[in-house]
Image: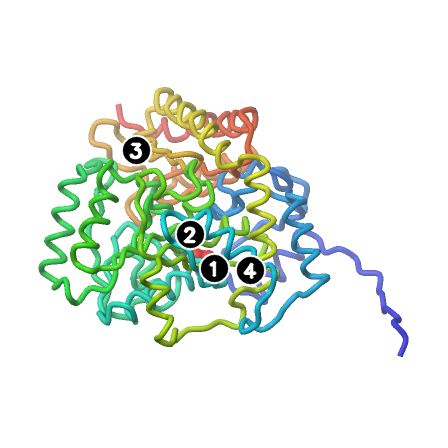
Amino acid sequence: MSNRVVTEAVRSLTAAEITELCLRHTLYDWSAQAGLDPMAIADAKGVHFTSVDGRRFIDFNSQLMCVNAGHGDRRIIEAIKAQADRLAFISPFMATEPRARLGKKLAELLPGDIDKVFFTLGGTDANENAIKMARAVTGRPKILARYRSYHGSTGSAIAATGDPRRWPNEFSGSVVHVLDPYHGVARGTDPAAVALEQLEETIRLEGPSTIAAFILEPVAGTNGILIPPDGYLEGVREVCTRHGIQMICDEVMTGFGRTGRWFAVDHWGVVPDLITMAKGLTSSYVPLGAVGMRPHIAGYFEDHVFWGGLTYNSHPLGCAAALGTIQAYEQDDMVGNSERMGAVLAKRLARLQERHRCVGAVRSIGLFGCMELVRDRKTMEPLAPFNGTSPEMKAINQALLDGGLYTFVRWNTIMTNPPLCITEAELDEGFEILDGALEIGDRAVAG
Ligand SMILES: Cc1ncc(COP(=O)(O)O)c(C=O)c1O
């Protein structure tokens, strides 16, 4: 048979056709489908992306806080292409060069003595498997998690999620939620000692010997860039060690430079028993997640079966993409850039708070930042309620898009999480658009 390739002149779809077909035949996340109007995207480069109908946006959220290296990085693309040419897929029971190299590289980068990983497809299944491992190793059923958290959309991961995405998904038991140090924009953050005392009390009342793990985002992401008070993570580490509870740090969003260190726990010198990652691992060019484990967990599975598996565990394209991504981070010192540009971002956020009455609080660590908008600077009433929105927040979001800035606007928060390759001039481009849109919020502020 000849290698004849059948080609057909295919006309490109218009923006309207793409949107219409996507809505008709594919289901969108976290939404009732009627009324959705997803933007059709053509391409992306660096910190910008362009819609099919020709509009250009600065990406101030790295999509879902995940395209850490920026869009269209040739090093990542070439790594994926080269691997696809050689070996696109092979069973996870085989050994491959990208798997070998990536495992070794992650063992170097991960905190402390974490030196073995289990590869998954994303963050949700990384957390599912970390929880499964903690339960297997301890023989205990319960998982502790915090309310202001997101850990993924299936089984144990959504049950561990503390925020309202859990409410319609509560089919898997044995998760106990504890309060966070942070209590909303009006009350602010407890000192570490108070938060740790509450944690201890919950553990005492639940029974320490029934708790397998405490899963937490070192800096909570979608719930508002909640930076723990100094001493909190160190204290959690100590409490977990004392009770034989495995500490699982969910670094799906914070990992790979987002906070100005390779991992957020590095700011406090804490080494969890299990650490989960995804998103920035490949800058999301292809799906890949991982669970990193300390030697006592890895050792347990030397003579106990690991009752888990995935067809796409250690997918060659994912591993190759991760190697290309880490190379890009290292060559351009993007983790250092996250810290340096993070200092600029913190100043720009503070300036917005000075200039706009509606900006009640700002927080950031590295290029992981957000502002909380309020109706009243004295009472700190949020501009949209918990788990809700308001006409003002919707109008601000629309003004940002009209001005050419895409970001994540949730409840009363606006996120500022650009790719880690961003320059100061590009940060200024985004902050100018934010500055203009916040005037809508100012008009809603009492007094
Ligand atoms: C902290 C955290 N954990 C887990 C997840 C779930 O990851 P994925 O959507 O890749 O399954 C997310 C996703 O946003 C996340 O932010």
Whole-percent x, y for residue 166 in the image: 31, 61
**394 to 173, vertically: above or below:** above
Helix, strand or loop at label 1? It is loop
**Disc 3 + disc 1, Cβ < 8 Å:** no
* x 45%, y 40%: residue: 258
**Disc 4 + disc 3, Cβ < 8 Å:** no
Would residue 30 be seen by someone viewing this image from the given angle? no
Earlier sequence position, callout 3 versus callout 1: 1
Earlier sequence position, callout 1 versus callout 2: 1
Helix, strand or loop at label 4? It is helix
Helix, strand or loop at label 3? It is loop
Residue that badge 3 annotates: 374
Alpha carbon distance from label 3 to label 2: 29 Å
Residue that badge 2 annotates: 252
**Disc 2 + disc 4, Cβ < 8 Å:** no
Residue that badge 1 annotates: 122
Given the image, on which type of amino acid does mark 4 rest? Answer: Ala
Alpha carbon distance from label 2 to label 4: 22 Å
Residue that badge 4 annotates: 100
Whether disc 2's CB lies below 8 Å from ligand 1 is answered yes
33 sits left or right of 45 in the view: left
* x 35%, y 24%: residue: 353
Q: Nearer the viewer, residue 121 or 16?
A: 121
Whether disc 1's CB lies below 8 Å from ligand 1 is answered yes
**Disc 4 + disc 1, Cβ < 8 Å:** no
Earlier sequence position, callout 4 versus callout 1: 4
